[in-house]
Image: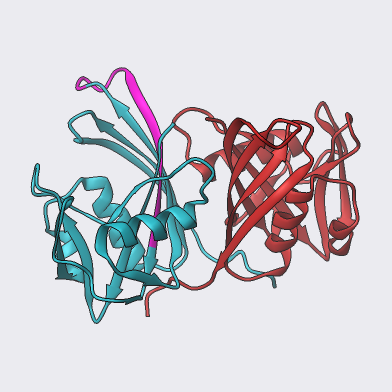
Chain colours: A red, B cyan
Amino acid sequence: MQRIANLLVVKDGHVLLLKKPRRGWYVAPGGKMDAGESVYTAAVREFTEETGAKPVNPHVKGIYTMVIMDEAGENVKDEWMLYTFVAHDLAGTPWTTTTEGELEWHPIESLQTLPMAEGDRTNLLFAVSQNGMQYGTFFYTEQFKLLREEIQNSVGGDRQ
Amino acid sequence: MQRIANLLVVKDGHVLLLKKPRRGWYVAPGGKMDAGESVYTAAVREFTEETGAKPVNPHVKGIYTMVIMDEAGENVKDEWMLYTFVAHDLAGTPWTTTTEGELEWHPIESLQTLPMAEGDRTNLLFAVSQNGMQYGTFFYTEQFKLLREEIQNSVGGDRQ
């Protein structure tokens, strides 16, 4: 089962997004966890490898189960886990062009309209604008059309 | 890859633990995620199935990569994910005896001394006594002797 960690940097009202060449869709920098890595270590490593900059004080904001169905939405083809982190500062200056695509700063509000997978929109908007944690399952087709999402949130959990 | 969610209820200075019959080790109630479940849904379902009570406002406190090695600590035999939740109240009265073992309330401090897997001690103590999130990798033998742990913590992440 694949495990993917991504990380959204939010700074001065802008977010750092990677524009992927294939569809022109935007994503938060990230990638596959290595064997034996923690989700935190993977998110930091992947972000740094993809941007050339280092996130400051990253914190997880979402844990998602990703279910990939056939185009008819009837049969499950794959299932994997997504861990979304946020950081409010970064050390170093991110590259603008990488082998993965173009790195661009966009106003936070543009997360509502930029082309991206609809489940990514849900989780990136949560990461930048809501307190606490989000959990859920996204059901996608293999062409990354969102069929359905089931979302839960929580806040708190600290000692009282 | 297995995904396990467990949940520790902390109330009136006590934690609800399950004493497993095989070794007499204590665990937080929990179990395997079903296909397509979120980690949150799995933690609530497993806790409720194992205790007969329902956690109130559960919140994730830890995400751990579990690496199982052979007894010599040389070869990886398995790898799975553990998600640890905490809740500070519960609805209903938990059973005392279940098919999984005995459910017992213990003072929070007893987490430091009760017999349990050493990685569980790390993550349950964090869940009840520290703010923020914990991440990490636990390296165990197949007999659940802890070989090594690599831990990271984070706080914050909310919008500023």
Q: Residue at x 73, y 50 (%)?
A: A119
Residue B121 is one of the magenta-drawn residues: no
Q: Residue at x 16, y 51 (%)?
A: B99
Q: Along the horizontal axis of the image, is B16 left or right of A141? A: left
Residue B72 point in image, percent of width and height: 21, 19
Which secondary structure is most common in the magenta stretch? strand
Q: Residue at x 31, y 57 (%)?
A: B49
Residue B137 in sight: yes
Q: Residue at x 35, y 69 (%)?
A: B54
Front residue of B42 and B16: B42
Front residue of A47 and B68: B68
Total numbered labels: 0
Instruction: Quadrant for residue B53, please give it.
Output: bottom left
Instruction: Quadrant for residue A65, please give it.
Output: top right
Q: Quadrant of the C terminus of chain A?
A: bottom left
Up-down: is B11 above or below A60? below
Find the magenta span and give its range. Answer: B71-85
Residue B104 point in image, percent of width and height: 14, 66
Q: Along the horizontal axis of the image, is B132 left or right of B51? A: right
Residue B72 is one of the magenta-drawn residues: yes
Residue A66 point in image, percent of width and height: 62, 41
Q: Along the horizontal axis of the image, is B41 left or right of B9? A: right
